[in-house]
Amino acid sequence: MAVGPCESTEGSPVKRASGRSHCPINFGLEAFGDPWSLLVVRDIVYFGKRTFAEFLASEEAIAPSVLAARLERMTTAGILRRSPDLADRRRVRYDLTERGLALIPVLVELAEWGATTDPATGAPADWIALVRADKAGMVARYTEAVREGRSVFVGDDSVAARVAAARAATG
């Protein structure tokens, strides 16, 4: 008998002492499973946002109290690292930890699914095609960029700018 990701070898759900399951999907949802948390990760990866004010300015209009709670929860879960902003020591900067960087493939899959499913998507079709053509390579580029403090779409040194420059150089 095949064992699912949320079952023990006996076929019954494995429960934590607290009554919550050991299901890996449940664990993931507890760590980052609300839309606001994934949107914070999106803002860091795709748009290079790093501060409370930058996250607050996102078009989804998260409430400040909700944002503060999500940032705290993600920091406690080891997804984000909180540090003083080097440009302005009065501000706090949030960066993805290695655990947070490991969410990039999940974000890429979710973006591809959303772009394919939503007829009114704002995702550029050529970018989605590029990701589909070399998903592993693009995930590696995204991860490297975020580790270096860059992003996918914003800035002269973004992944998109580098891909465009490489395309221009080859023809």
Image (cartoon, grey):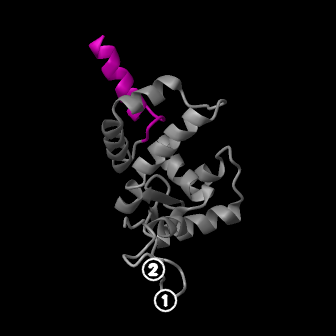
The structure residue drawn at horizontal position 68% and vertical position 43%, both measured from the top left corner, is 59
In the figure, is residue 60 to the left or right of 126? right
Give the quarter of the image for residue 135. top left
Q: Can you give x and y, in whole percent of width and height, for residue 153 in the image?
A: 47, 34
Residue range (magenta) = 151-171
Q: Give residue 3's position: percent from left, percent from top.
A: 39, 67
Task: Where is residue 19? Give x, y as percent.
Answer: 55, 85
Image location (x, y in percent) of residue 108: 45, 43
Above or below residue 145? Residue 67 is below
Q: Could you tell me how far apart the alpha carbons at marks 2 and 1 are, in whole angstroms?
A: 10 Å
For disc 2, the marked residue is: 14
Q: Nearer the viewer, residue 52 or 142?
A: 142
- Give the class, few, some or many, for how many residues have Cα within 10 Å of label 1's Cα (few <14, many ≥20): few
Q: What amino acid is found at the position of numbered circle 1 in the picture?
A: Ala
Residue at 40% from the left image edge and 27% from the top image edge = 130
**Mark 2, mark 1: which one is toward the viewer?**
2
- Helix, strand or loop at label 1? It is loop
**Residue 32 lies in the magenta-colored region:** no
Q: Secondary structure at mark 2?
A: loop
The answer to whether any part of residue 113 appears in the image is yes
Q: Is residue 89 left or right of residue 59?
A: left
103 shown above or below 118: below
Residue type at mark 2: give it.
Val
Which of the image's four quarters has the C terminus? top left
Residue of label 1 = 17
For image coordinates 42% across by 59% down, the residue present is 100
Q: Residue furthest top?
A: 171
Residue lying furthest bottom: 17
